[in-house]
Image (cartoon, grey):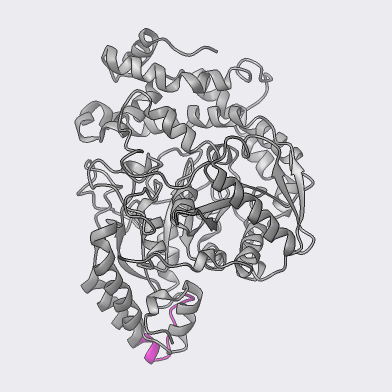
Amino acid sequence: MTAEPALLSLTSVAQAIAQKRVSSREVTQSCLDRIAKWQPRLNAFMAIEAEAALKAADAADAKLSKGHLGGALHGVPLAHKDMYYDAGRVVTCGSKIRHDFVAASTSTALQRLKDAGTIRLGSLQMAEFAYGPTGHNAHYGPVHNPFAFDHITGGSSSGSGSAVAARLTFAALGSDTGGSIRMPAHFCGVTGLKTTYGRISRAGAMPLSQSLDTVGPLARSAGDCALLLGLMAGADPQDPTAIAGPVPDYAAAARESIKGLRIGVPTAFYVDDLDSEVARILDETIAVLKREGAHIVEVELPDQRQLTAACQLVLAVEAAAFHKRWLIERPQDYGPQVLMRLQNGLAIPGVSYLEAMRWRGPALAAHNAAVAGVDAVIAPVAPVAAPTIAESDVGNSPDAESVIQRLTRFTRPINYLGLPSLAIPAGFTRGGLPVGMQLIGRSFDEARLLRIGAAFQRASDFHERLPKLS
Amino acid sequence: MTRPSPKEAKAMADVAGVPVNAEVAARIANSIGPAFEGFAAVAGTLPFDLEPASFLLVQAAKDARKAST
C-alpha cells in the first residue's frame, strides 16, 4: 500500500478499502492532508468538511468490520461541483445569490454515489451558475491550475478539474452544457466524460439549459470514469429525459482492446487554427491509437459553425429564462460577465430559439450519416493549452463573448447534438501545461469511448503525472 | 435571419420584461450577432412538419441505440 493513499486511483482505493488493506479513515485523512496543503494555492474547494468526513469514514470502517460492504465505493471520500443538491446542505452554485441556499432534496446522481458508499469531503468551486468556460468566479475568486498556478483551470467545473488533478479527491461530478467537463479536463490533465443527453438523470442538478445540460464525472482515468458512469446511469422517475433500458458494463468495456476499431479524424474545423503544440499532440495521440490497432480514417463532418451558432441560441435563451426572476430582482448580485451573458438571451426571438431546437434532429441525423463508417471521432478539446488567469479575465468587456466562443468552439457542437465525448490527457506542452483530446461517439455509446480512452491510457502515462506543489 | 440592432435588442429585452439601457443593448447585439449569422443558412429553411422532438427520435434510433448494448 502506498504511503499516501490519496494518490491511488478510484478503482484501486475502493478495492483496497473493501479488502481492508487500508481504512476509510486513513484514506480520508490522506485526502484532507493534501487539501490542507493545496487549497491555499488552488482555491478548488468551496467548503471543506473535515470533521464530518472523518466521522463518516469511521462509520464506514465500523460497518466493514462487521462485514457490511456498503457498495462499490464503500468508504471512498469524494467532493463534487457545488451544484448538486444535497438535502439539508448549502449549495451555492458558485453564486452570491445562492450563497445560503439549502437544498430540500438530493440529486439523483449524487444519491446513487452515496448509495454506492461514498462519503463527502466537502464541495468544489465552479463558475457562477456554471456559466463560464475559464474558471474565473467574480464572487469566490479564480480556481488555479495545479500544473501552473497562474493559469486557468477551465470551467465551469473548475474546482472539479483542479481538485482531481491535484489528487485532493479521487473523482468529482461536473456538468457539461457547452464544454464544462471537457475544458477543465483538458486544461488540468484529467479524464472527463460528457455523457449523452439523457444518459444520467439531471434531477437535483442546478439547471443552466435543460436541452443541453449533462451530468458526468472527472476522474484520473477512463477506467475510473467507467466505474462512476455505471453507478450513475439509468432511468429516473424524477427526470423523464433520463432514458430507460439496461446500463452497459462500462468497466468491462474499458478493459477491451481497440484492435480493429475505426477512429475518424475530421478534415476541417477541429484541425483548423490549432496552436502548434496542440496540433503536435493530436498527431502523437493518433499515432498511439494506430499502434494499439485502431484504423485511422478521415471524416468529413457537416458544418460545425452552424451547430455552434445553434447551441449558442438555445443556451442563451434557456439560461435567461431560468434566471429571469433574479435578472429582474437581483441583477446587482451577479458577476459582470455572467450578468452580461444572461442578458444576451433576452434579445433572441422565440421563433429563432425554436428553429434552433427544431433543427437538432436533422443535424444529428446528418452527423450520424457522416460518421457511419467510424466508431468514434478524435478532436482537440480546445485550440490552445491553458492561458493565464490574467489574460483570460475578460469580464464583461465588449469582446468577452467572442473570446468565450473561440475558446469553446470545439465543445459546443457536441452539446447541441447531445453526443457523448470523453476528454483524455494526451500530452504536455514544452512549458508543462496539459493538453487533452476528446473522443466523440454516437449517442449512448460511452462504452466505446471508454474502451478507446482506457487503451490509450494503458499505452501512455499522461494521466498519471502529478503536479508539484512548489 | 439577421443580427438584431442595439435598438431592436433593447426593444426585445423590454418586451421580455427585463429592461436594459442603451449600453447593455449595444453589448447584447454585439455578443449574439455572430450566432444569428452562423445560423442564417438554416433559418427559414426547415420543413413544415419538423418538431423539436425529432431530436429524441433520431437519438433513440436503432443504429444509435445499438451502440449501447
Of A103 and B35, nearer the camera is: B35
Q: Picture coordinates of residue B33 (x, y %)?
A: 46, 18
Magenta part of the protein: which range?
A: A63-72
Q: Is residue A67 magenta?
A: yes
Q: Is residue A439 visible?
A: no
Q: Picture coordinates of residue A470 (x, y %)?
A: 30, 65
Of A84 and A157, nearer the camera is: A157
Q: Is residue A340 magenta?
A: no
In which image quadrant can residue A328 be found?
Answer: top left
Q: Is residue A296 above or below residue B53?
A: below
Q: How many marks?
A: 0
- Magenta span: predominant SS is loop
Instruction: Please tell me which residue is depicted at 29% across the width and 83% down the height of the picture.
Output: A58
In which image quadrant can residue A53 be found?
Answer: bottom left
Of A172 and A137, nearer the camera is: A137
Q: Picture coordinates of residue A49 (x, y %)?
A: 24, 67
In which image quadrant can residue A293 be found?
Answer: bottom right
Of A443 and B34, nearer the camera is: B34
Q: Is residue A156 visible?
A: yes
Instruction: Please tell me which residue is depicted at 29% across the width and 57% down the height of the picture.
Output: A42
